[in-house]
Image (cartoon, rainbow, N blue to C red):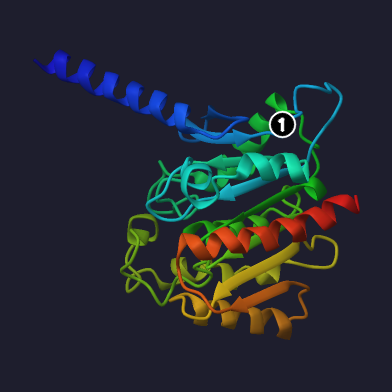
Amino acid sequence: MKIAKIIFFALAALLAAISTAQNLPPNAELVEAPSASMGKKIGAVVVVPKNYGEDANARYPAVYLLHGFGGDHTTWALKTKPNLHELASELGVIFVCPDGSTSWYWDAPKNPASRYETFVSKELVEFIDKNYRTIPSAKCRAITGFSMGGHGGLWLGLRHPDVFGLCGSMSGGVDIRPFPLNWKMQESLGSYADNEGVWDRHTVINQLHRLNAKNMPAIIIDCGTSDFFYEVNEALHKKMLYMRIPHEYVSRPGSHTHEYWRNAIDFQLEFFRKRFQRQ
């Protein structure tokens, strides 16, 4: 009976993967990138331009898109922005959408098995650059996302400007400390009451000191005025102004929805495209 259950769940997982693959847009594929730091393979959706196979010498900038809490590697392509394949062709970029689980894209200090900062910023980037015709330069590699993924876009961009020369956030949880009981963050950081220092060190707004003129990524931040993360994004924007950190900040009517992010990503991709062209 136990063996039968194992076979059943394995088949169910396989059928789910096949179904997801069949629903992906054109020029998109599911891949599994190895993570030595976590001892497993992690799913990602990669979307290439329509003419990717026509010129074996052509190379493309890469844009990494991070999902929010409760999503996975298929969220961007199937729900948030189903026309990613059209944008990949129009902009001449490769999109990479990794599964971040519920990690907040940290190497979790309280959970050694969760090392998604290492995975995305090193292991995944190396896998993509090896298997796809990217331009392997930070100046042609961008990262952004929404909600938890917005936190991840800035967390990874500010901490690894040598990897991601452009970074962004949409409705990002850029200061997690006002939300100590939400989104399983305690599993990664411990309780806020007992680990204030850990929480201080794992929030985006406290990473700005890492930046200087020599390692400054191009930064874009967007948050709707009705979003529950609006106040922390405003605080980040003001702190960046005070510290004279160059950035683009967009604030307009909207809330924490895929409809908002579906629109916001267009502005961010244009921001990235202009800077890719300068290289």
Q: Looking at the picture, which amino acid does disc 1 mark? A: Lys
Question: Observer-nearest residue: 139 or 227?
Answer: 227
Q: Can the viewer see residue 39 in this picture?
A: no
Quadrant in the picture for residue 247? bottom right
Q: Can the viewer see residue 83 in this picture?
A: yes
Residue name at image x 8 percent, y 15 percent: 1
> Dot 1: what SS?
loop
Question: Observer-nearest residue: 128 or 82?
Answer: 82
**Percent position (x, y) of residue 44?**
53, 35
Q: Residues within 10 Å of mark 1 (few under 14, many from 20)?
A: some
**Percent position (x, y) of residue 117?**
55, 48
Q: Name the residue tied to disc 1.
A: 50
Residue name at image x 73 percent, y 72 percent: 248
Quadrant in the picture for residue 257? bottom left
**Percent position (x, y) of residue 14?**
35, 21
**Percent position (x, y) of residue 160?**
69, 53
Residue 248 vs 187, above or below: the answer is below
Q: In the rendered view, does 264 fall on the left or right side of 232?
A: right
Q: In the rendered view, does 102 fall on the left or right side of 165?
A: left
Residue name at image x 47 percent, y 73 percent: 255
- Hey, which residue is sitting farthest left in the picture? 1
